[in-house]
Amino acid sequence: MSRPPRTAPAITKKLLVLAAALTLTACSQAPAAQEAAQTAAAPQTGFPVTVENCGRKLTFDKPPSKVVTGYHPSLETLLALGLGDRIAGRTNFSESAFLPGQKEQYDKIPQISETIMLPQKEVMLAQGADFVLDNAMASFDAAGGYATLEELDTAGSPVYILGGWCSPEETLQYTLDKTFTDIQNLGKIFGVPDRAEKLVGELRGSLADVKKRVEGRTPVKVLAADGGKGPVNAYGGSGITNQMITAAGGENVLKDVKGDYTEVSVEQVSAAQPEAVLISDYSTLRGEDMPSSPAKAEEAFAIAKNSPAAKDKRYLALPVAAQHPGYRNILAITDIAKFLHPDAFTQ
């Protein structure tokens, strides 16, 4: 449903007037006070900055200070950049484990939604955010009762979508480099480019280490699935999960399927003969309990019952948050590589 856009509330400026009579001392301080006011009004170094996202140009005259984050990978990415003090509201995350050291920061940030989705339109607009970070378009769908990108822009709450997940087609075009670009863009937006470059350097170093360790090894045939007795919810050869499997020294057995998260037939899974299985791990979805990872793994093994993976019961529960754009998805590549090639990490 659609509702009229809401404009940003006016900011009331109060002038503090000293009741004391003017003195020569006060007069002598006036130039200093005037200079301080001019300094405060001066543009911050490095600003304005402009970045492109979802076909839009977003310009910032100063770093955001009242941020709202959507699905958890967006919050994780800002926390990794040391920007927790800028976050005024977040959504709920109760589907899997937190990254080390982040649960304490998460608990200090006000929760504005009981699910992974941003709140409905009126509640969202009432936040008065000066920046919104998410990694999917689902929370900006007018048909679902959410504030749109345009409405939030009008309200002074520009939206940035991680990973270029701005449309179904663009989701399929994701590459790992887009996560690095996001981190660098956020560094510009928040005036911390040095932190961003340091973080990107660390993540690139992690990827380089994985590449060196798995190089020359035979890729492990991997089925990435999310349960289902037929059709099976699985990940094809386009998008983020396929990129992660490849970087970790694996070969997606559904690489010829054009799709990211999609449905495939029982026959396709049975014929794929995976040597290992990745299972999307999340205990809740929009407030509803979900099947456990062991249960979903057993479904996959039952379908691919003659495969090496089924015989060895070899699977890894992969947090679904890692299968979305953000800081965590790069970290997870190391976890997948250790699962696929454990002997490559013995030293």
Image (spheres, grey):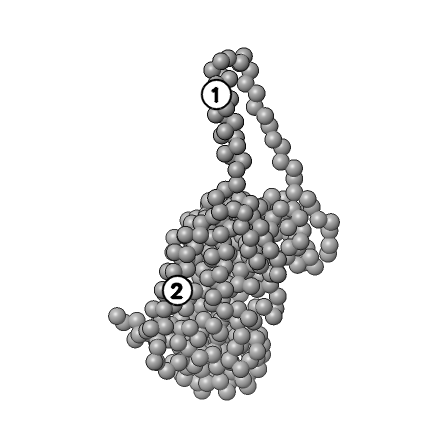
Kindly indicate whether the residue at mark 1 contacts the one at mark 2 (C-beta within 8 angstroms).
no
User: Which is nearer the N-term, disc 2 or disc 1?
Assistant: 1
Whether 85 is drawn above or below 143: the answer is: above
Q: Position of residue 146 (x, y in %)?
A: 66, 54
Residue, disc 2 = 204
The residue that appears at 47% across and 67% down in the rendered structure is 176
- Amino acid beneath label 2: Arg
Q: Is residue 241 visible?
A: yes
- What kind of element bears circle 2? helix
Judged left or right of residue 279, residue 201 is left
Query: Can the viewer see residue 89 in this picture?
Result: no
- Residue 16's image quarter? top right
Q: Residue at x 50, y 13 (%)?
A: 23
Q: Could you give the CA–CA distance between mark 2 and mark 1, rounded to whole angstroms?
A: 53 Å
Image position, residue 198 (x, y; %): 39, 56
Structural crowding at the residue carrying mark 2, measured as other residues with C-alpha within 10 Å and reported as few (<14), some (14–19) or many (≥20): some
Q: Amino acid at mark 1?
A: Gln
Between residue 70 and residue 33, name the one nearer to us. 33
* Residue name at image x 49 percent, y 52 percent: 188
Q: Is 321 left or right of 217, judged from the image as shown?
A: right
Binning the other alpha carbons within 10 Å of mark 1 as few (below 14), some (14 to 19) or many (20 upward) gives few
Q: Nearer the viewer, residue 223 or 183?
A: 183
Q: Which mark is residue 29?
A: 1
Name the spot of residue 252 as percent of width and height, x first: 47, 79
Is 278 rendered above or below residue 107? below
The numbered mark at residue 10 is: none
Count of marks, rendered view: 2
Question: Which residue sits at x=41%, y=68%?
Answer: 333
